[in-house]
Image: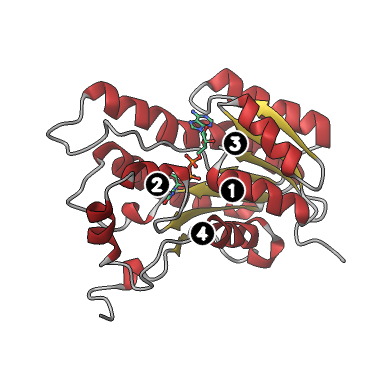
Amino acid sequence: MAGRLDGKVCVITGAGGGMGREAAVVFTGEGAKVCAADVDAKLAEETVSLCSGEAFAIGVDVADEAGVRSMYAQTAERFGGIDVLYNNAGISPADDQSVLDTSVGAWQRVQDVNTKGVFLCCKHGIPHLLERGGGSVINVASFVALLGAATSQISYTASKGAVLSMSRELAVQFARRGVRVNALCPGPVETPLLLAIYGGDPEAFARRQAHWPTGRLGTPREIVNAALFLASDESSFVNGAAFTVDGGITAAYVTPE
Ligand SMILES: NC(=O)c1ccc[n+]([C@@H]2O[C@H](COP(=O)([O-])OP(=O)(O)OC[C@H]3O[C@@H](n4cnc5c(N)ncnc54)[C@H](O)[C@@H]3O)[C@@H](O)[C@H]2O)c1
């Protein structure tokens, strides 16, 4: 049976865990050739061992320009070009909180990975897509780019807002050259990143759960299914979107109960 990503070469950052790992497994299962990139090379290798199709691992910090450039060069050399950038790597450290309490250092670390990382992946990845005559860029933002919260993670929220607006601008700039750019905005998803934030605090979990129309977290697969659509040609007219996959959170004023 034909795969939905047959013949496509995809670079997935943050592929050592959570949604990035899930994406590498699903994308290779759909016929893609995948570069699984993560700051933790060992985790990226583990991901590759779970993939059914052609994949290789690279250890790279997305905040490091030389590393990002080399990640794309190695992928293009190995697979003959690149069609999809899935810019998924992101961090949400515990010391990123209210603007009143967050240090400049904590602010900067998040900006370096989440904002500069996406900038560098677009800067050095898009030229490879242009060489192929087009492609798809999936920049992972978040529902927090669209909604505010009193339980703030100020740098994370600002970084995801930047990813969203950066994606819109790139979508317009490259549309006539065949490159689509969308910002994937997941709602809260059951991954180590989020479980670490809620870690052992049922009250914090319950406070948030009250705002979720579905009453539950998303699964990594539910987000990756949307990324699969954005990566494939099925989404050929989807460009510049804030593509929310959030169980209805951004639609909700009050929840059903
Ligand atoms: N989990 C959620 O609820 C949620 C909601 C909305 C958006 N997101 C976003 O989705 C993306 C994936 O989140 P996740 O929950 O799967 O995260 P995760 O923590 O489970 O996995 C993130 C991966 O990124 C890697 N990574 C961290 N810093 C890196 C760097 N500098 N360079 C390369 N790789 C690096 C980590 O090693 C890890 O393997 C992130 O951008 C996150 O902000 C997550």
Circle nearer the N terminus (1, 4): 1
Q: Which disc, if any, is residue 219?
A: 4
Report the Cα–Cα distance between label 2 and label 3: 16 Å
Residue 107 visible in the picture: yes
Q: Please name the residue that numbered disc 1 is placed on.
A: 137
Which one is in front in this view, the residue at disc 2 or the one at disc 1? 2
Mark 2 or mark 3: which is in front? 2
Q: Residue 244 or 174: which is nearer the viewer? A: 244
Q: Compute the Cα span from label 2 to label 1.
A: 27 Å
Mark 1 is surrounded, within 10 Å at the Cα level, by few (under 14), some (14 to 19) or many (20 or more) other residues, namely: many
Real-space CA distance between mark 4 and mark 2, rounded to the nearest whole angstrom: 12 Å
Alpha-carbon distance for marks 3 and 1? 19 Å
Instruction: Kindly identify the residue that appears in the image at 65 percent across and 32 percent down.
Output: 44
Residues at discs 3 and 1 in contact (Cβ within 8 Å): no
For the residue pair 210 and 174, the one nearer the viewer reads as 210
Asked if 68 appears above or below 156 in the picture, the reply is above
Mark 1 or 4: in front is 4
Instruction: State yes or no: Cβ of the residue under disc 3 lies below 8 Å from any atom of ligand 1.
Output: yes
In the rendered structure, which disc, 3 or 4, sits on the residue that comes first in sequence? 3
The residue lying toward the viewer, choosing from 21 and 58, is: 21
Q: Residue at x 27, y 34 (%)?
A: 96
Mark 3 or 1: the one toward you: 3
Disc 2 crowd, CA 10 A, few/some/many (<14, 14-19, 20+): some
Could you tell me the amino acid type at mark 4? Answer: Thr
Label 3 crowd bin: few (<14), some (14–19), many (20+), radius 10 Å: many
- The mark found on residue 16 in the picture is 3
- Asked if residue 225 is positioned above or below residue 83 in the image, the reply reads below
In contact (CB < 8 Å): disc 4 and disc 2: no
Label 1 SS: strand
